[in-house]
Amino acid sequence: MFKFNDPHRQLRQELLAITLPVFTEQACITLMDVINAMMAGHISKEATAAVGMVDTLNIIFIAVFSALAVGGTVIVAHYIAQNNIKCANETVKQALYSGLLLGILIAGSLDICRFSLIHLLYGVADNVVQKYAVAYLQITLLTYPMIALTSIACGVLRGAGDTKTPAKIVILMNIINIFFSYILIFGVNVKLPFIAIHLSGMGVVGAAVGIGIARFCGVIIAIYVLARGSWGLKLKHIFHYQPNWEILKSIFNIGIPASVESLLFNAGKLITQTFIVTLGTVPIVTNYVAMSFHSLMCVPGNAVGIAATAIVGRQMGKGEREQARIHLRYMRKIAWICMVGLNIISCMFFPFFISLYTPNPEIIRSASLLLWITALFIPFWPNSFILPAGLKGAGDVGYTLLISAASMWIFRISLGYILCIHLKMGVLGIWFGMYLDWIIRGIAFYFRLKGNRWQNHIVIKHRATEGEKI
């Protein structure tokens, strides 16, 4: 019998063990937004436009919380690789309190200026759309601290190697969201022999309340898991907190550049949204629906990217620098196969999937066209997103910030504006700017990976003593 030497067998098994739960988690997170978009689409096109505009704003700050969670993920991964359980657990508490404070500050600041913010960004939209947007934003702002805590809790669990628990938490959140959002959006009227239940639908407000309930349940479960203990992590003395500036510095050295990168990147998306608002309600909905479904198509790649951050982080923590490079290249290849394959299989079904969002034939046709064109450019996506995810695991956050911000603002925003407004290409012009952004980012990150400078970052300075090890 012949035995073939497969140098990637162990990595493939590790990647599969990490990625499948993360894939499930990311699919459920994305489905929460997709399902809300579908349900809002059956209220009215104005409701869909409002939810889409506010979600574009919400995603900016959700991404900031997720980026801060990357700081916790990387630091925990490095400490776990060194068997430094004491510092890993202290990192969990420091990251959670930092995220809670950030969530409260951002939510409070935005709530004060919510009317002015909607008018500034979307003042040219219909009055009904603006009214829906303010109502949806006001409620979803209350969930920001919950999002921050859940993101960080799931991030540190992944950093320790536990990818199944975050997936289970998000699955449960999704079930709760579907149940409550449907009832609160459309109402319920049930007549039984001994009881009659009638609840009027709350429309857009119901969608916001439903997802808020799901996020509240998610944070309660996540904190309970950490307090009970999982994979060596155990959150003790939850209500007793004292800043540990050394650990906070390590978290922020990763989290702040990653947060700024996400802030600038998603702010760029918001700016391109303001270009589209000037085109009318139908283009707004077309862009939102197409982008919502595209985010679902990116779930496999995002899952590999999250796994890349954790795997590279642990390998760099052990000092296995060249292995980190080899494994990151392999993970990019896996993501490429998954993304291209999924788009090829799904191409013929795009109109059907879009029809689940809205019955409007013009929106179905235009959104399907955007997705078909995107499928042609999807091979450039892995270099653009998988590689920087792995580089962050190594602590190379400054370079990823510089490239991501520069590419976004030069190509997505500047070129997108020229194509959309001046050359009158509409929504398609914005998407062509996005494609070029993928290509340029991908080239820059490819050459970064080939070099050695990304391997020279010191992520943590504290080394474990014997008493701190397992």
Image: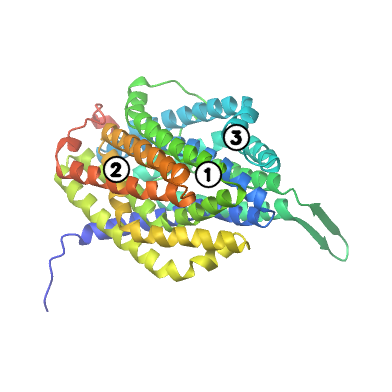
Q: Residues within 10 Å of mark 1 (few under 14, many from 20)?
A: many
Q: Which structural element holds mark 1?
A: helix
The percent coordinates of residue 36 (x first, y second) are: 60, 52
Q: Which residue is mark 2?
A: 388
In the image, residue 333 above or below residue 161: below
Three-letter amino acid code at disc 2?
A: Pro
Residue at x-position 52% and y-position 59%: 366
Q: Which residue is mark 1?
A: 276
Going from N to C along the chain, the mark reached first, 1 or 3, is: 3
Residue at x-position 26% and y-position 54%: 331
Q: How is the image coloured?
A: rainbow
Three-letter amino acid code at disc 1?
A: Ile
In the image, farthest residue toward the bottom:
1
The answer to whether residue 223 shows anywhere in this view is no
What numbered label is drawn on residue 141? Answer: 3
- Nearer mark to the viewer, of 1 and 2: 1
The percent coordinates of residue 167 (x first, y second) are: 46, 52
The answer to whether residue 389 shows anywhere in this view is yes
Q: For this view, does 440 lie left or right of residue 265?
A: left
Which of 353/175 is in front? 353
- Nearer mark to the viewer, of 1 and 3: 1
